[in-house]
Image: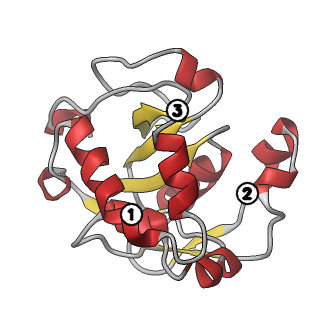
């Protein structure tokens, strides 16, 4: 893991959040996306505009975005978020891969599209293995970010079982933003 990467999640990936995320990811199902964004930032106890640095999102695969109509991570990032990343290449769908393959698959699939500030808040919907987020964060680091705070609505798997913490912890754990100094 990169020393300048922190990760926080608002919820464990379980119902009712899991069901709402699945609905929001179906074609035409983005009606609840704004409500999920509200829940994300309310649960973390911070207004997204109050975070230091620039907010951006993990871009969805182009085919997924076309079928859904919008990028859920972009909606979660909120107004004022800036698209700093693009997808390159065609990695396989993460759902079709085993855990080891999931960790390797996204490596090198993101590229910064513009100058990147030293502090970035990177938003995604769900963190399972953390590989996609780590690949996106690495692209941001390669383009100049010193610190990246990964914010996800939900975290799945073993990370979700570890429970919530009172401050951000390295990728692989769940935490909560306490103050500007955390980023």
Q: How far apart, in angstroms, are the residues tagged by discs 2 and 3?
A: 16 Å
108 on left or right of 14: right
Q: Are marks 1 and 3 in contact (CB under 8 Å)?
A: no
Give the residue number, with chain letter if any, for mark 3.
171
Residue contact at pointers 1 and 2, CB within 8 angstroms: no
Residues at badges 2 and 3 in contact (C-beta under 8 Å)? no
Q: Residue at x 51, y 35 (%)?
A: 15
**Residue 155 horizontal side relative to residue 83, left or right:** right
What residue did someone put label 2 on? 106
Q: CA distance from mark 1 to mark 2?
A: 25 Å
Q: Position of residue 160 (x, y in %)?
A: 54, 24
**Residue 137 drawn above or below residue 91:** above
Measuring 59% from the left and 72% from the top, which residue is drawn there?
111
The percent coordinates of residue 137 (x first, y second) are 52, 53
- Counting residues from the start of the chain, the first of labels 2 and 3 encountered is 2
Determine whether, in the image, residue 168 is placed left or right of residue 60.
left
Where does the image place residue 43, in percent across and percent down from the top left? 25, 36
Residue 102 visible, this angle: yes
**What is the crowding at mark 1: few (fewer than 14 residues within 10 Å), some, or many (at least 20)?**
many
In the image, what residue occupies the spot 23% across and 71% down?
79
Residue found at x 79% / y 52%: 95
In front: 21, or 137? 21
Q: Residues within 10 Å of mark 2 (few under 14, many from 20)?
A: many
Q: Is residue 82 above or below residue 153?
A: below
Residue 40's spot in the image, x, y percent? 31, 46
- According to the picture, the residue beneath numbered tag 1 turns out to be 33
């Amino acid at each position: 893991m990169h020393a300048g990467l922190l990760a926080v999640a608002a919820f464990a990936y379980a119902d009712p959040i899991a069901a709402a995320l699945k609905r929001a990811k179906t074609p035409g199902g983005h009606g609840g996306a704004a409500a999920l964004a509200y829940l994300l930032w309310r649960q973390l106890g911070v207004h997204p505009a109050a975070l230091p640095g620039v907010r951006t999102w993990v871009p969805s695969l182009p085919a997924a975005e076309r079928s859904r109509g919008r990028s859920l991570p972009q909606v979660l990032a909120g107004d004022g978020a800036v698209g700093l990343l693009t997808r390159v290449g065609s990695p396989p769908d993460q759902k079709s891969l085993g855990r080891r393959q999931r960790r390797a698959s996204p490596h090198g699939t993101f590229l910064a599209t513009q100058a990147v500030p030293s502090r970035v808040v990177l938003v995604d919907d769900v963190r399972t293995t953390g590989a996609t987020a780590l690949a996106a964060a690495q692209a941001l680091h390669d383009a100049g970010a010193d610190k990246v705070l990964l914010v996800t609505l939900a975290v799945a798997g073993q990370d979700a079982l570890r429970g919530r913490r009172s401050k951000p912890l390295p990728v692989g754990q769940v935490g909560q933003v306490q103050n500007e100094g955390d980023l």
